[in-house]
Image (tube, rainbow, N blue to C red):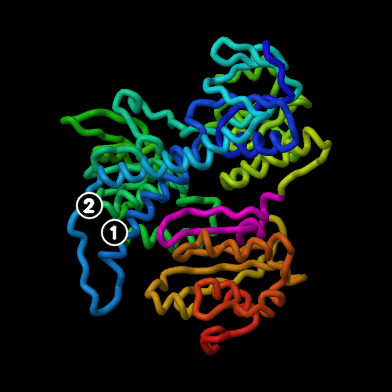
Amino acid sequence: MKKYDLIIIGGGAGAFAAAIKANELGLATAMSNYDLPAGGTCVNVGCVPSKVLVHAAHVVHMVRAHGVPGIHTTVEKIDFEKIIQDELATVQTFRDEKYEKVLARLPNVTYKEGGAVFSAQKEITVDGEVLSADNFIIATGSKATVPPIDGIHEVGYLTHIEALALKKLPKEMVCIGGGPVALELAQVYARFGTKVTILQRGTRIFPHGESELIDRLVSVLEKEGITIKTNVLVQRARIENGRKVLTYSTEGHIEEITTDEILLAAGKTPNTKDLRLDISGVTVNERGAVVVSNTFQTTVPFIYAVGDVTSLPKRLETTAGHEGTLAIENIVQGKHNSIDYRTVPYAIFTDPGYASVGVTEDEQMKEAGVCACRTVPFTQIPKAGIIRRTEGLIKMGVDPKTGVIVGVHILAPDAADLIAAAVPLIKNKNTIDDVLAMEPVFPTLSEAIKYAALSFTKDISQLSCCI
């Protein structure tokens, strides 16, 4: 049996960040990868490949709908198989450069492929080899949830993993779910030419978002030809005449839809089932997520957990990475690092994209009973008019007593990039006066943040361009 200072179970963003920090601090560390190749979900079957397809679909859409008078363009051909080949090649490049080569430069880290299981409270077994350590970090991530739909396993389905590696473009696709994965892939496939229908169980698409902006996003997606149905409960799946048929109830009616592919994007399930956490003594909640404190410590003092496998709020891959780094400092240096998740942004990479940091109007109303909120349409943002992208909105919420900005929500092209300018405003508790004292570059979409602040005191439709 080999003894280590630290064992990390997992191979994604949180695991790698922890390994890098542990290596810096000189800990003899073993990292047992779980399920996916080095890099985990993000680089292999998540952020990287999906954004390659998002960009490709955006190029197709801009050729068809750039809106510039005097320029006439058409898409001559979409070679879907070649697009997928390029996506997978990009994934391989990122995995080689940012994970496998990084591992090779970590002399204190021993990397092992294979699913680990706890065989004692301070021991794991990896492919028959027993490893022990004084401390552990669980960073096994999550996988797509398979809803309890009668016949779904027999009929067959896609998760994000298979949807990112299809060889043939389907004529029709049904996406079950209304979160970021469903919305992004629905738009990607629709822009490539697939007829896409989204079936969402809840009353709203992406219910955690700022409702006014999400409603506008739904309108944009529907204009692109995507059918979106809410209040849907999918009950059964079957094969009929070689095609897949879903039976679902909606508003008291039973309906059916026939399709070529079914994409399951109805949430994620933490990867804890096969870890034998009962042996370790670590507690999980009703979702199977590892219960942790705000310092990432489980119910067992020497076992920590980070990323999607935990009960903590889910934000970004970079959040999992930050948690991994902070957890190592907590273990080794006795710190009590934590993260204020309200200052962490999140995004949906549709086009226009949606990005948010801080609290929404609904959240502010629940907590304070009052909301000082303003929404500015991108028809008022000069750069949006210049590039003919005025469908967007920006919404800002402030504390009515102090003027401190508590939430910024953006629907716009490249919203995930724009939200970066709002993050320090939330983190540093800046006021609208602080924003009004700034001079953003003209013309840029990022001016929208100042326009939002101005809207609390002025009629921005009466202002000149250079504010």
On whether residue 54 falls in the magenta region, the answer is no
At x 50%, y 72%, the residue is 445
Which residue bears the numbered disc 1? 60
Q: Nearer the viewer, residue 259 or 413?
A: 413
Q: Residue drawn at (45%, 54%), measured in percent from left and top?
A: 349
Q: Is residue 248 left or right of residue 119?
A: left
Whether residue 121 can be seen here: yes
State the image quarter where residue 454 is shown.
bottom right
Residues drawn in magenta: 340-366
Earlier along the polypeptide chain: callout 1 or callout 2? 1
Q: Amino acid at mark 2?
A: Ile
**Residue 306 picture location, percent across and down:** 65, 36
Up/down of 134 relative to 141, above or below: above
Q: Which residue is mark 2?
A: 78
CB atoms at circles 1 and 2 under 8 Å apart? Answer: yes
Residue extending furthest right?
334
The percent position of residue 248, horizontal first and vertical second, equals 34, 37
State yes or no: residue 363 in magenta. yes
* Residue 211 visible in the displayed image: no
Location of residue 383 in the rendering, given as x and y in whole percent from the top left corner: 46, 77
Q: In the image, 264: left or right of 134?
A: left
Q: Secondary structure at mark 1?
A: helix
Quadrant containing the N terminus in the rendered view: top right
Residue 295 at x, y percent in the picture:
75, 39
